[in-house]
């Protein structure tokens, strides 16, 4: 499991751009929490993860020093890793890695769309009722509130729809994109798309 963890962290760093040290720090915190929750934990215990091998150890000050500094200026520690800690460590590692990947993907998505306020985007209507209309933009859904809808328009499921990105909000579940069919910018941008001279300022 240890070498698999190292390879997994390297792959995530390459593909998702998540710093390995950030992942290891989050993983250490999760492992320490799991240790305290599932075992009769030793006071002042800490987790040590070898970056190269993935080996995990739980270390604690020896009772003889009670955490006081030894003559060499270092705290004398002993390993107190429970025999079956690997199973719990594997579960914690999986949860932390998946959570960090989701967080990174949400942030990437937010950065992508936050710079597109004022753009026209085409999506497919997924759901429409009196409260709101959901527009599928591919990787994310946009919200078309009633206040941004044209009263005479019908938003049928599966229909393609051009909308204007009014606002992009950062939320714990990812970016919330608010789009409009009534914003004055929509008409302006549509004219720019159809008549290039308007876009060029002529």
Image: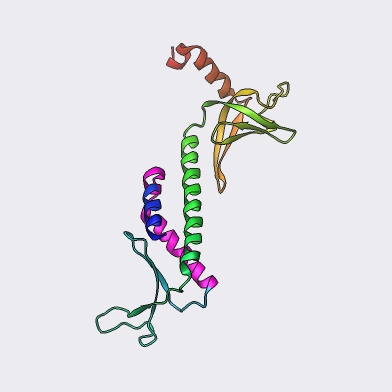
In the rendered image, residue 105, in percent from the top left (x then y), is placed at 48, 43
Q: Which image quadrant is residue 182 in?
A: top right
Furthest-bottom residue in this view? 64
Furthest-left residue in this view? 72
In the rendered image, residue 39, in percent from the top left (x then y), is placed at 52, 74
**Of the pair 151 and 84, the residue shown nearer to us:** 84
In the rendered image, residue 114, in percent from the top left (x then y), is placed at 49, 37
Q: Which image quadrant is residue 80 in?
A: bottom left
The overriding secondary structure of the stretch rendered in magenta is helix
Residue 146, above or below 3: above
Count of marks, rendered view: 0
Q: Is 114 part of what is drawn in magenta? A: no
Residue 64, above or below 19: below
Quadrant of the drawing holding the N terminus: bottom left
Furthest-right residue in this view? 130
* Image point (50%, 67%), residue name: 33
**Of the pair 32 and 180, the residue shown nearer to us:** 32
Q: Is 33 part of what is drawn in magenta? A: yes
Position of residue 137 in the picture relative to residue 58 (left or right): right
The residue segment tinted magenta is 12-38
Quadrant of the drawing holding the C terminus: top left
Colouring chosen for the image of the structure: rainbow
Residue 53, above or below 154: below
**Of the pair 191 and 29, the residue shown nearer to us:** 29
* Image point (49%, 65%), residue name: 87
Position of residue 127 in the picture relative to residue 60 (left or right): right
Position of residue 32 in the picture relative to residue 186 (left or right): left
* Image point (66%, 31%), residue name: 126
In the rendered image, residue 69, in percent from the top left (x then y), is placed at 31, 82
């Amino acid at each position: 499991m240890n070498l698999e963890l190292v390879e997994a962290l390297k792959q995530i760093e390459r593909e998702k751009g998540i710093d390995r040290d950030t992942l290891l720090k989050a993983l250490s915190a999760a492992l320490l929490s799991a240790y305290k929750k599932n075992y009769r934990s030793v006071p002042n215990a800490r987790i040590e993860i070898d970056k190269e091998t993935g080996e995990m150890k739980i270390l604690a000050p020896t009772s003889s020093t009670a955490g006081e500094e030894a003559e060499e200026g270092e705290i004398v520690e002993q390993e107190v890793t429970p025999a079956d800690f690997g199973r719990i460590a594997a579960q914690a590692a999986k949860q932390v890695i998946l959570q960090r990947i989701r967080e990174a993907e949400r942030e990437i998505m937010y950065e992508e769309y936050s710079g597109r306020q004022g753009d026209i985007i085409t999506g497919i209507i997924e759901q429409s009722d009196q409260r709101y209309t959901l527009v599928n933009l591919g990787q994310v859904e946009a919200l078309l509130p009633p206040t941004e809808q044209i009263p005479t328009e019908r938003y049928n499921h599966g229909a393609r729809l051009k909308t204007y990105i009014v606002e992009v909000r950062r939320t714990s579940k990812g970016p919330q994109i608010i789009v409009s069919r009534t914003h004055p910018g929509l008409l302006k941008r549509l004219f720019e798309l159809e008549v290039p001279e308007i876009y060029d300022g002529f």
